[in-house]
Image (spheres, rainbow, N blue to C red):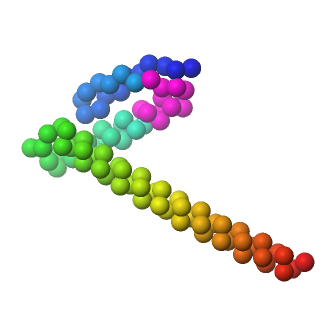
Amino acid sequence: MAQNIKLKIAGIEYPMVATSPEMEETMRTAADEINRKFNSYDAKYPDKSVLDKLIIVTLNETVNRIACQKKMIQLGAEAKTLKEDIDAYLAGKE
């Protein structure tokens, strides 16, 4: 069941809709992580605007997501190769 929630990011409150309790938890965790990173950039770059700091957070998170996706593809290919090697080994044992 969808639930209306409010998330505060960089001091600004945003109304959101969580489609499940798990999604609400994920959204709150994400908001906490964004705020943690924002606060870090806020301390490093006090003269930058809120928008600039949020853009830096967004860029870093997107780079990390893309790197994780590439790693997952690589690991999937390695797992496939290992499975093929195991299957070939077991077929040779018979």
The quadrant the N terminus occupies is top right
Image x and y of residue 6, in percent? 37, 22
Residue at 29% in and 32% down = 9
Decide: is 15 above or below 82. Answer: above
Q: Is residue 94 left or right of residue 18?
A: right
Image x and y of residue 16, in percent? 40, 24
Residue at 25% in and 34% down = 10
Q: Is residue 18 left or right of residue 51?
A: right
Front residue of 40/59: it is 59
The outermost residue toward the bottom is 92
Residue at 36% in and 41% down = 33
Residue 40 in view (yes/no): no
Residue 48 in view (yes/no): yes
Image x and y of residue 37, in percent? 29, 45
Q: Is residue 22 magenta?
A: yes
Main secondary-structure element of the magenta-colored stretch = helix
Residue at 90% in and 78% down = 94
Q: Bounds of the magenta span?
A: 17-28
Q: Is residue 53 left or right of residue 75?
A: left
